[in-house]
Image (spheres, rainbow, N blue to C red):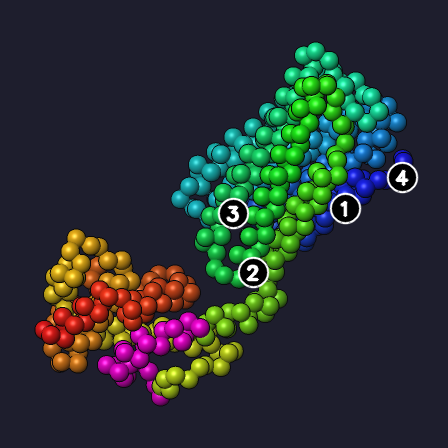
Amino acid sequence: MSDPGPADLAAYLSAAVFLLLAGQWIAAARTQPDEQAKRYAIGFALCMGGGLVARAPATLTALGRLGGGPYPGALAGDLLKTAAGGLLVLLALALRVRGEPESRLRTRRLIRRHGAAAVTVSVLLVLLLYAAHPAVRGDSLVVHGTGRWLLAGYDAVFGGYAVCCLAVLSTVLARQIRRADAGLLRTGLWLMTGAAVVGVAWSLWTLDDLIPVLLRGRQDNGEDIPSDVLGAICAVFAVSGATVTVWGATRWGARITAPARWLRARRRYRALEPLWSALHTAVPGIALAPRPGRRPPLRTAEFALYRRIIEIRDGQLALRPYLQPQLPEWLAAVEPGGEPDGAVLEAAALAAALEARRAGRPGGEPAGPGWVPQPVPGTVAAEAAWLLQVAAAFAGSRLVAEVRQRARAA
């Protein structure tokens, strides 16, 4: 084998990163051996690493010396990359199965369909390349006549299939990012999305072979330096994303992100202070020995936020007899034809109930369940996010201020 050049070093480095990623996922899969998504991820990393090694110029040269020319090695590398693309789609669909239980049967049918599509694309690549009957001239493939169109079709199918696979993965990752809470998991998903975006650029770069093939009937057999650099960047993003995502599911990840969670919880605790203070003034019994204005210790901020949420909900429950039946009429008078969102509606109901409580005038629930504040199902973070919207509307909404004035006048 000849001494490796820059393109070989870049290809082997990228392959090593992908193989490192496979090893990392194999180690993580030991704790969850039955998780289908991890098996697809491991297969993707192994196929991509093997494809990069097979496509390196030094590897192709060594295979050419063994007989048969270098292009069977290039075909093997492309088939491994095609398999990697198919496994990416299966990985994306497996994530959909985990995230959307109601569509499991349909997603499983899509998995079988995309598996068949990957096999079909691989067979088509083999047929196109051998039908083109390229000759080897140094480090290039040379074709004549209709062989130009067949080889160009090979490049188009190979690059286009990879772009389609990455587009499917990017769509699923974007959906997962919207659902994930802030933390290592979301950061890892963003890094994986970056890997998919770079992968699209990497796949599109392979289409630069179309012009020389159609015009001159010649195509370089190995990967060039820009392609290998894009592959290395894609691999680094993928490994970083996988590492951060795995950390996010371990005790070490929880420890690393704890200070950020504490700070976020304390900011939310302080942001809920105006709403909590108004409720506590009306219903002092919602808190024991309260000390308004004092920040909780950083390490106990999450517990303090959880307690504050419970106290706000207790205050809302205590104010329920004071909800005003006129509330829908007041809202319609302030904003004719408008439909306030849920947070503004809940803040307006609380403002009117507080004024009625101060005046000692019980009211009764307005018609319709939508006028009664309801706890938000889900995590403490979801509940806090909702109450932050209510608190912002309670303190700053013009509509809530108008309802407060009308309740006070009544």
Q: CA distance from mark 3 to mark 2?
A: 14 Å
Q: Amino acid at mark 1?
A: Leu
Q: Quadrant of residue 359?
A: bottom left
Left or right: where 319 falls relative to 231:
left
Q: What residue is rendered at 81% in x and 21% in y?
A: 136
Identify the mark at residue 184; answer none if there is no mark: 2
- At label 4, the amino acid type is Asp
Marks 1 & 2, CB-CB < 8 Å contact: no
Span shown in magenta: 267-289
Return the residue nearer the eye: 163 or 6: 6
Give the residue number, with chain letter if any, for mark 3. Answer: 173
| Image side of residue 106 versus residue 62, left or right | left
Residue contact at pointers 4 and 3, CB within 8 angstroms? no
Local crowd at mark 4 within 10 Å, few (<14), some, or many (≥20)?
few
Instruction: For marks 4 and 1, give the CA distance.
Output: 15 Å
Task: Provide residue 130's location: percent of width, then percent of height.
Answer: 71, 18
Q: Nearer the viewer, mark 4 or mark 2?
A: 4
Q: Residue at x 81, y 42 (%)?
A: 6
Q: Is residue 39 visible?
A: no
The mark nearer the N terminus, 3 or 1, is 1
Q: Secondary structure at mark 1?
A: helix
Which mark sits nearer the N-terminus, 4 or 3? Answer: 4
Q: Choose the circle earlier in sequence order: 1 or 2.
A: 1
